[in-house]
Image (spheres, rainbow, N blue to C red):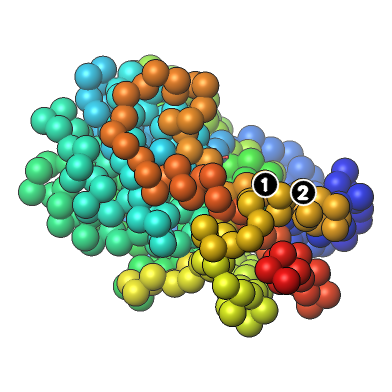
Amino acid sequence: MTAGPHARTLVPVMRPWLGVEEQVAAAEAIASGWVAQGPRVAAFEQAVCEHLGAAHAVAVSSCTAALHLALVVLDMRPGDEVVVPSLSFIATANAVRYVGAEPVFADVDPVTQNLTPETIAAVLSPHTRVVILVHQAGVPADIDAVRALCDPLGVTVVEDAACAIGSTYRGAAVGASDNLVTLSFHPRKVITTGEGGMLLARDGAIAARVRRLREHAMSVSAADRHAHGVPVLEQYLETGFNYRMTDVQAAIGVVQLGRLDEIVARRRALAEGYRARLGTVPGLALPGDPPWGTTNYQSYVVTPTEEFPVSRDELMQRYLRAGISPRRGIMAAHLEPAYEGHPHVPLPATELLTRRSLVLPLFHEMTVEDQDRVADVLIEAVG
Ligand SMILES: *Cc1c(COP(=O)(O)O)cnc(C)c1O
């Protein structure tokens, strides 16, 4: 790998694993003369469906766009309430505002960092229409338990699996459920197309509408129009968006998807390496698999508890001095200026986690020496 803009950071928090195959695939897409959404996007969608066991996949420009379109096809309206964890990347809550609905923040489980039936039940109202269940940091949430709460109430579950491609739930891939599921291919996630996202759906009619909405709600896609021998006049069926992925991105995505199993296996081995080094450090909570599935360790979030002698912010300083780039743990949207004054129930677990936790570096090409250096900062902190 060549030195990027962060070359002075010796151990980055994340580095995408991209090789010559991705370069060749992108170059082939360019040489083909078709760089906008086209055959490579269709091939990437097909490959994701096969890999995850999904019925329909629609590639879009980001996971944020996929979340927006999910809420559009669920016909969210002003006054509708959508339950989200505050403890998530802010895009989860923002997507709700895009459709004029109200994000309602629910607390999370302090171990999985995910919504639970109990935290959701605490914020349900007669206006609740949707719950966005985030598989935070790759740790799968308990989908069936949340559905058991929501289904009798007519509340729809959408899975924000931005972080969770390659994680599993009850023996199947995350993404194989019959919920609408969104994925991200941002470089901070497990596989990347630079920018990119996808919406997975079981229902073909919903997928077809999402497919139109990403392309200005045209009745005939640009690619199909070109494939016809005769002129085809398209119609614009509703107010759509330009949320298309390019064929250059999709070409990279096909190669990255082929690496997914290897990437996840490597991430899990590195997580084992952290557990071997840090498992006996007192006052330090480490991430792991929940009883119902496996995590891809998209982010390795550790939480120093009150017994831990050094504060999270002091630890971050020590890491920077050691040439290591940690990140704070998952953000809490309700604490950001964008949500100032937005009403919410008490969110004690969310506030504790966002204040105390940090993300340790974990990337495919991380070495044993890198891991030792990262672990040593925590080990030295406890003396
Ligand atoms: C990264 C992330 C997003 C946004 O993904 P983009 O592809 O960057 O739009 C949404 N939700 C969660 C939980 C994320 O981690």
The residue under label 2 is which amino acid type?
Answer: Gln
Q: Which mark is residue 78?
A: none
Residue drawn at 48 percent across, 50 percent down: 353
Residue 285 is situated, as x and y percent measured from the top left of the image, at: 52, 66
98 or 123, which lies in front?
123
Residue drawn at 9 percent across, 43 percent down: 153
Residue 258 is situated, as x and y percent measured from the top left of the image, at: 61, 67
Outermost left residue: 152
The residue under label 1 is which amino acid type?
Answer: Asp
Work out how far the residue at label 2 is from the one at label 1, CA to CA, in angstroms. Answer: 6 Å
Residue drawn at 53 percent across, 41 percent down: 331
Q: Residues within 10 Å of mark 2 (few under 14, many from 20)?
A: some
305 or 218, which lies in front?
305
Res 329 visible: yes
Callout 1: CB less than 8 Å from ligand 1: no
Q: Is residue 328 left or right of residue 60?
A: right
- Look at mark 1 in the image and give the residue it sits on: 313
341 or 292, which lies in front?
341
- Look at mark 2 in the image and give the residue it sits on: 317
Q: Secondary structure at mark 2?
A: helix
| In the depicted structure, whether residue 200 falls above or below residue 142 | above
Q: Secondary structure at mark 1?
A: helix
Q: Quadrant of residue 19?
A: bottom right
Res 75 visible: no
Residue 189 is situated, as x and y percent measured from the top left of the image, at: 60, 53
Residue drawn at 48 percent across, 30 percent down: 335
Q: Are marks 2 and 1 in contact (CB under 8 Å)?
A: yes
